[in-house]
Image (cartoon, helix red, strand yellow):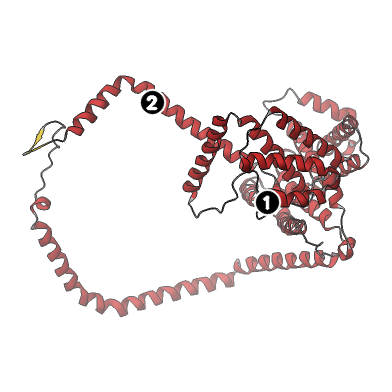
Amino acid sequence: MMAGGVRDERSEGVAAAFPWRQVGVVSVLLLELSLIVPWIHLLFSGPPAPGIWLLLVWLLAYALLGRWVTIVSDRMQLRSGLAMILSAGILILGLLLTVNLMVAPGRLFDLARAAGELIRALPMIYPMAPELPLAVLVMLVWRRGVASASHSILDQSRTSFKFRLGVIVYGLLGLVGRGAGFPWGPALLPLFFFSSLLAMSLARADRLSRLRGAAEPPFSFQWLLSLGGLFALAVGSGLALGAGMDSGLAHRVLVSFQELLLSLLESTYRLLLPLFVALEPLIARLLAWLRGVFLSVDAISSPTLQPPAPAGEQLGNLDAPPIFDAINRWLAGLQPYWPIVRIGLIGLLLALLVFSTIRMIRRRRGSPWDRRLPQDRGESVRGEPALGGWGRRWRELRDDLRSLGSSLFAGQLWPTLVVRRVYARLLALAAEQGRARYSWETPLEFQAALIRLFPAAADPIRVITTAYLQVRYGELPESDQTIAGVREAWDDLVRLVEA
């Protein structure tokens, strides 16, 4: 996290006057808060509750406080216990202030009363006291502020997902607010769209700027003002167009357009009516001919519905093949064991479902840089054939089973997994520092780049790379000594990098 906080501060040239990464973080937090705060405001719609804008500003400042505390703790290299005590104290203080802000704004600093209200609300699980979801909200906002100290807060795919989720949330808010009469829904909607636009733009810029050879984007305050002006122009034009379409003039124009379409349709029908009259005898003759053809076939005009002869009996002058008798006898012999067979099939189906779920979770839990640059995580670097979804899943399952079987046969399953896992961690660490492995790089080529990236850890990098080459390409048998050496090299590398 310290690396993320340090990287957030790097800016040169024109971009030094405009902290665009910090603006991106604020826009992401605004995007998240504009989705969370309205639901909490529904619980506190009484007279003492403050306006939703005051609650939004307060929680944004609270999240930024969590970000600042995390960055300062990392820079001062505070011990984990001391940093945890500091965070817990600020979290409890913010929770008590938020309770007073929502319940009794006039006594904002009466922390003892807020603590009493919160303690009395803890046993009230059902029906739930409103202080409980408020406490969950404060802890969630604090956690988002702490997470914003890392550069992963500007991950492009996550920001786009939050925007799509927000469209659904505001659709639900529109349905709830229409019946309850909450006027703040339309007021927050422009903030949600503007923060989403800003967050997605800066998240994409952050992704591109972290690629190898990229420079800092030349953002400025004029760019931000221009973006806000364009957004205000688009929203104003939409509101003006909506108001115009709701006027009496627009209604009369639509009615006139409807009458014009109906008159054009009637004129077209009148023009085509002679053609319909001319084609009617031809269509009637065609239908009569088809009816005569069908009636001339005995199997169609008078069908006989008789069940087929059972297996083993004579069918006309033909005898049933002996294979049918064998199949029937086999099925009859299988009938007493059918409950066991059914349990086995159900177990196999559940195992396949669990296996598919684990694969899906492992893929979705991949690091953000997995979607940025192609990397070799110890798997095949061959070109992917053009297969469909099921073909690709079948090929992956086949490769996994083949790899698992070969490892078990060689008796080296655990060492192989250990070495590949450590090498994957090395790739992840390099990607965090802005230098991911390209798909066209061999491990030896990437080893040189790793040594330039971590010059103090050259020896551990060579040890890990050599072990990975033996496992991945050489298929040599490993020993406990190899595993111990790789683990020791990884610990040395982490210690040297963090030093």
Indicate the secondary structure of the residue bearing disc 1.
Answer: loop
Residue 134 x, y percent position in the rendering: 76, 35
Q: Is residue 174 above or below residue 225?
A: above
Front-lying residue, 388 or 247: 388
Write down the quadrant of residue 262 in the picture: bottom left
**In what element is the residue under mark 2?**
helix
Q: Residue at x 20, y 72 (%)?
A: 280
User: Residue 135, relative to residue 186: is it above or below?
Assistant: above
In the picture of the structure, the residue carrying the numbered disc 2 is 342
Q: Quadrant of residue 176?
A: top right
- 218 vs 380, nearest the viewer: 380
- Dot 2, crowdedness within 10 Å: few (<14), some or many (≥20)? few
Query: In the orientation shown, which residue stands out farthest toward the right?
Result: 76
User: Up-down: is 333 above or below 1?
Assistant: above
Type of amino acid at the residue the image marks with label 2: Arg
Image location (x, y in percent) of residue 242:
63, 65
Is label 2 or label 1 in front? 1
448 sits left or right of 71 in the view: left
Q: Quadrant of residue 249?
A: bottom right
Quadrant location, the C terminus: top right
Residue 71 appears anywhere in the view: yes
Gap in Å between the C-alphas at discs 2 and 1? 49 Å
- The residue that mark 1 highlights is 442
Could you say where residue 401 lies in the image, as x and y percent from the top left? 52, 36
Q: Please state if 81 lies on the left or on the right of 470 as rendered.
A: right
Task: Quarter of the image for the N terminus: give it.
Answer: top right
For this rendering, which residue is in front, 486 or 305?
Answer: 486
Tell me where residue 87 appears, x and y as whole percent. 87, 34
